[in-house]
Amino acid sequence: MTARSKITTTGKKPIALLKVLNPFHVWGLGVGIVLVGEFMGWNFTVDKGGAYASLIACWVIGLLYTCVAMIDSEVSSTVVAAGGQYTQAKHIVGPLMAFNVGLYLVMAYTMLCAADALVVGDLLRSGAKVMGFAHLDPRPFVVLVVVFLSWLNYRGVFVTLTLNLVMTLLAFVSLLVLFVAVEPWQQGVVLQHQGLLTDLPYGWIGVIASLQFGIWYYLGIEGTCQAAEEVRSAGRAIPLGTMGGIMTLLVAATITWFVATGLLPWQYLGQTYTPMYDAATLLGSAKLQLLMFVATAFAAIASANGCINDASRAWFSMGRDRYLPEFFGAIHPKYRTPYRSILFLVPIAVSFAFTGLLDQVITFSILSGLLSYTFMTFNIIKFRRMWPLGSIHRGYEHPFHPLPALTLLALCCLTYFATFLGYGATLLSVMSFYILASLWFVLRRYPYVRRAEQFSMPWPRPRGY
């Protein structure tokens, strides 16, 4: 146990986060956050550039996230502490970057949680219409989902992520069932790709524009590193869970595109909130429709659950180091969870969910995530220079360095341009928000940071220092 894990005391006994998770929990956390993107959100790529553009975005952004998973697996299995990329930045770059990265993470996960709650509400409204309730208000259900999942996170990480694992497995299996149900081996019987697929309706500029929502296929897999302080063996669990997760998502994303574009016209597919449920509806099977209804709900709930877990760990870590008020760095004496951080983020997630602006909330989450991926490109290069291979123990060493970092940087820049094409005002407002937050940190919060206690890993002095 490191000195930084000793946060709160009861008498003389230190209270720390529990080390109870294994690689399956890490897989369930990473894939659970993301898999909702296979049920909704990804289809906005079709609206931007057509069905083929969506497929290109799926694979190009898949390459981006493969680089993210490789880099994250190395650094997170070495920097064994809650906070993920925030903790990495604290050790490798410095306080200002660490504050910004922590804020990126909290906002990305909180916005994603709000989007998930919106999906659950919209799904319940669709189900209510089928049952004859045309005017169901989904907002009470949005609040109920967020509050219940926050209570679950409050009570303990093991049960929380075990539930995530079960719901994620069921949602993934439902995609495989749908794939078999459309009889992909008999093109033209159920799937109608020949009649539905068209050339790029907006040309290659549409392909570039689609990259923005292509991130929704995989957004959140990097959250696996938030569990680093609560797994029994970070050097084993983080790489296995993260790399296994990205491989699962590449398969799920390709299946999703293949099924949906063979059943739904691209003009409709690019606008709906629940594409996979709508696709199942066209097959005329009540059982399959019910399965996809439940699976979409499970995917959204699992994602919101994982987001609350990850956002609270990042917020808690920043409070523990006094980047935020130390009040947020407390651990519950019984449940061993960062309970104050969990409770603090509930009204923020609900407030954004109540806006009802799914595409804007998704864009805010995407941009916050994209900023953290951009940081990772510089972070891994500096990490390798400061502590070369062989100087410290690494749980995983990603290959072909620095090619993944350079590839990731190039794809991030391309995705920024894609976002600017469709949501230029949102991009500028998000950047302005983080600039103002940085000024607040430098002017008001930095004097409280304990610089002497920032470096908590038992490593030798870095090269050049």
Image (spheres, rainbow, N blue to C red):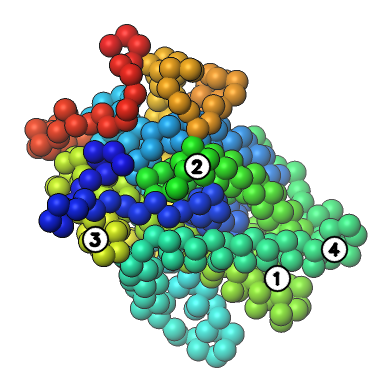
From the image, tell me which residue sits under label 4. 183
Q: Residue at 31% x, 42% y: name it.
A: 1
Residue 153, percent across and down? 36, 64
Q: Dividing the picture into quarters, in which one does residue 399 lie?
A: top right
Which is in the foreground here, disc 1 or disc 2? 2
Q: Residue at 80% x, 63% y: name it.
A: 180
Residue 384, percent across and down? 44, 18
Does dot 2 land on a helix, a strand or a loop?
helix
Relative to 173, 141 lies left or right: left
User: Residue 333: which disc?
Assistant: none
From the image, tell me which residue sits under label 3. 332
Mark 1 → mark 2, Cα distance in angstroms: 35 Å
Give the vertical position of 40 relative to 391 (above or below). below
Q: Earlier in the sequence, mark 4 or mark 3?
A: 4
From the image, tell me which residue sits under label 1. 280
Does dot 1 land on a helix, a strand or a loop?
helix
Mark 4 → mark 3, Cα distance in angstroms: 51 Å
Q: Residue at 55% x, 81% y: name it.
A: 127
Q: Earlier in the sequence, mark 4 or mark 2?
A: 4
Give the vertical position of 41 relative to 189 (above or below). above
Instruction: Give, as a three-letter code, the residue at label 4.
Output: Glu
Q: Residues within 10 Å of mark 3 (few under 14, many from 20)?
A: some
Instruction: Give, as a three-letter code, the residue at label 1.
Output: Ala
Instruction: Give, as a three-letter code, the residue at label 2.
Output: Ile
Does dot 3 land on a helix, a strand or a loop?
loop
Relative to 388, 23 lies left or right: right
Q: Nearer the viewer, residue 348 or 174?
A: 174
Q: Dividing the picture into quarters, in which one does residue 392 lie?
A: top left
Q: Earlier in the sequence, mark 2 or mark 3?
A: 2
From the image, tell me which residue sits under label 2. 238
